[in-house]
Image: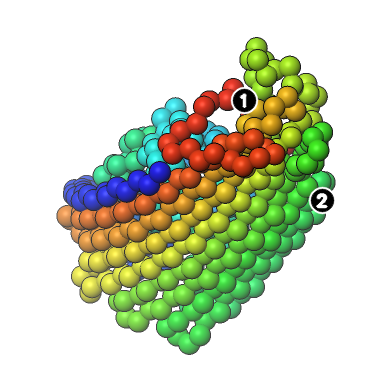
Amino acid sequence: MKTQYLLAGASFACLALVSPAVAKSTDDSNTASTDHGEIIVTAQRRQEKLQNLNIAATAVSGDTLAERNVVRQLDVQNIAPGISIVKAGLTESINIRGIGLASGSPAVSNGVSNYLDGVFQPPIVSTGSFYDIANIELLRGPQGTLVGSSSTGGALLINTNRPQLDRTSVSAGAEYGSYNHAQGDAAINLPLGHDFAIRAAGLIASRDSYYTDLGPLKNKPDSLHEYDGRIGLLFRSGGFQNYFKIEAIDKNTGGYAYQPILGTPLAAGRTNIPYVLAYNAPTYNYERANIFVDELKYQFDNGLVIRSVTGYQNKRINNAYDSDATLLAASTQLQFVRERQYSEEINVISDAAKPLNFILGGYFQRNKVDVVITNGNAAGPTVPVSRSTAAISVEPLAGR
């Protein structure tokens, strides 16, 4: 199945402030920081104090995320109120105050907008581990004016650390735990002259499966082998700055853990033993993503800022399922999903200290989604399915 769609929009926000917000529009970062104990966020395309926002918002720094063991997007629900995130096969279902995404289809629009470094994220392949994160910002309630049409429930903004022109820094971390869990990450920031800096960061992680498969193939559902990398370049001269980022995600697991629902015909094949499964077809889950972001910004002497954010993403998923999740039948399903997204956002942002405070913007997005699904016997050739497949009553098992 091939689907193409085009999104285009423009928004204008004009806010007359009785007491102008204190903003740092000249800063070259796009991340939350602290200013004399106050949290500075960029939820409205400029840096301003969190308490001056007239929306319900939560901002959490990267250091706090690490302290609270928030290592992936799924963990955000453990530290911020009003948000729930559920792994739903091809996608992660994000809901804020009960509004969001309730479908596992990559063709269904988000109900909660998810942005990574200022670029809207399609719902597939959004499960990479957190590393070198500057902060996350959670906005509750409709955010259509500044965030977009897919934000009825709110928005989740994830910002990674950008290159810094004024310092050289190196950070690294490693950990080891049960189930042979091993992870290492590192980041280095190098200023090259007064106007240019580069920052590189990466992560390697692996873990054995929590589950035992009694079937002949000894599948390893919910295991992990992940390799992520990111390179950012920053150039600044006078009022002009250019931030360019390349990011790659390569994540391989043993597929998903699930079993027949009680009361269905296949329930007789349940093991009824915690963390014990019985598959007779191969299972796997392989996610890859390449992300490119280019942000151009120019600030005039009067404080007016013109900003352009260009994004390109190529995300792919290969899945294999034991369709019945038992040893009773030998049915399998293979899935391939690829989504390519091109986006462009233009902003004209006023100086927040001026009597007239406004943000003028336009947005363009084009997505192409390719979906190939095949069904068949685990021991024989598969049969292509053009649009949909027969539903199998299974329920997921949560990992530890």
In the picture, measured across the screen, residue 353 lies left or right of residue 206, that is left
Q: Which mark is residue 162?
A: none
Q: Crowding near pointer 1: few (<14 within 10 Å), some, many (20+)?
A: some
**On-image quarter of the C terminus:** top right
Secondary structure, mark 2, is: loop
Taking 123 as reference, is 221 left or right?
Answer: right
Identify the element where label 1 is drawn. Answer: strand
Q: Quadrant of residue 156?
A: top left
Which is more N-terminal, label 1 or label 2? 2
Q: Is residue 229 above or below residue 89?
A: below
Q: Residue 394: which disc?
A: 1
Number of the front mark, 2 or 1: 1
Q: In the rendered structure, which amino acid carries the disc numbered 2?
A: Asn
Q: Residue at x 71, y 61 (%)?
A: 184
Pinpoint residue 232: horizontal percent, then vertical percent: 49, 71
Closest to the observer, 36 or 319:
319
Residue 134, given in percent of the width and then of the height, sits at 53, 58
The residue sitting at the bottom extreme is 193
Closer to the camera in the image, 380 or 339: 380
Q: Tell me which residue sits at (31%, 76%) in the image.
A: 240
The amino acid beneath tag 1 is Val
Q: Is residue 365 visible?
A: yes
User: Label for residue 180?
Assistant: 2
* Vertical arrangement, residue 170 with respect to residue 262, above or below: below
Q: Image height check: is 108 above or below 30?
A: above
Quarter occupied by the N terminus:
top left
Q: Residue at x 38, y 78 (%)?
A: 236
- Residue 176 image point, x, y percent: 80, 54
Q: Position of residue 293 (x, y in %)?
A: 41, 65
Q: Residue furthest front?
A: 380
Foreground residue among 21 and 78: 78
